[in-house]
């Protein structure tokens, strides 16, 4: 995916929020090749997990991420990924011509994942976070194949698009992924609620 920064979302009031837009599920993967790994609670983030502040190198935004997770900076200093076991948080800021909408995000995510293994269940809606209303895309995709076991995990992905207008319009993407069925509702919300423009 091109960028991202993503939890069970608290939707905006029904009167202000359109129904989620969905796309058809992708065709099942071929029977040969890597095998799926049984998902388990190995993706659950502990309730006592501590969080630390992370500011994007560009200085445009910041948020809290789980302490102790492995960090990898993105090329160009536009963000970073944080990983622990099978969980990943990816944060990226990029210029924008206009605010994202349900329609544009639906098309963008579908195009970026058209060749991704296991891509399915795409649904896009608007939700409310502390920083502002944001566009949220939810979908599933297969994780990279483990080179040792030749197995993959089905991941649940949440991608949040935060927009800031002004002389330099920006989108910060927060993409959160964890094994399907993981109970990360509270941690994912804590991360996205902590997002602030600077």
Image (tube, grey):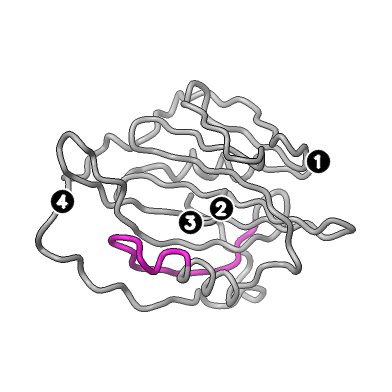
Q: Is residue 170 above or below residue 107?
A: above
Q: Is residue 127 magenta?
A: yes
Q: Earlier in the sequence, mark 1 or mark 2?
A: 2
* Residue 82 coordinates in the image, percent (x, y): 50, 34
Residue beneath disc 3 = 1
> In the image, which is nearer the foreground, mark 1 or mark 3?
3
Distance from Cα at disc 4 to Cα at disc 1: 44 Å
Residue 25 sits in which quadrant?
A: bottom left
Residue 117 sits in which quadrant?
A: bottom left
Q: Is residue 48 above or below residue 8?
A: above
Q: Secondary structure at mark 4?
A: loop
Q: Earlier in the sequence, mark 4 or mark 3?
A: 3
Residue beneath disc 2 = 3
Check if mark 2's residue and mark 3's residue have beta carbons within 8 Å.
yes
Residue beneath disc 4 = 34
Q: Which residues are magenta?
A: 112-128
């Amino acid at each position: 995916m091109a960028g991202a920064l993503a939890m069970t979302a608290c939707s905006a009031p029904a009167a202000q929020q359109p129904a989620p837009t969905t796309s058809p599920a992708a065709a099942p993967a071929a029977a040969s090749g890597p095998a799926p790994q049984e998902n388990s609670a190995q993706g659950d983030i502990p309730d006592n997990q501590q969080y630390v502040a992370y500011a994007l190198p560009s200085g445009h935004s910041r948020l809290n991420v789980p302490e102790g997770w492995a960090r990898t900076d993105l090329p160009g200093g536009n963000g970073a990924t944080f990983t622990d076991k099978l969980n990943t948080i990816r944060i990226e800021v990029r210029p924008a011509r206009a605010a994202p909408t349900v329609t544009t995000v639906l098309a963008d995510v579908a195009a970026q994942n058209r060749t991704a293994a296991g891509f399915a269940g795409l649904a896009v809606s608007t939700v409310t976070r502390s920083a502002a209303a944001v566009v949220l895309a939810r979908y599933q995709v297969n994780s990279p194949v483990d080179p040792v076991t030749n197995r993959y995990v089905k991941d649940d992905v949440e991608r949040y698009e935060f927009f800031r207008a002004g002389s330099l319009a920006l989108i910060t993407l927060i993409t959160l992924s964890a094994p399907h069925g993981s109970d990360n509702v509270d941690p994912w919300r804590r991360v996205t609620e902590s997002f602030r423009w600077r």
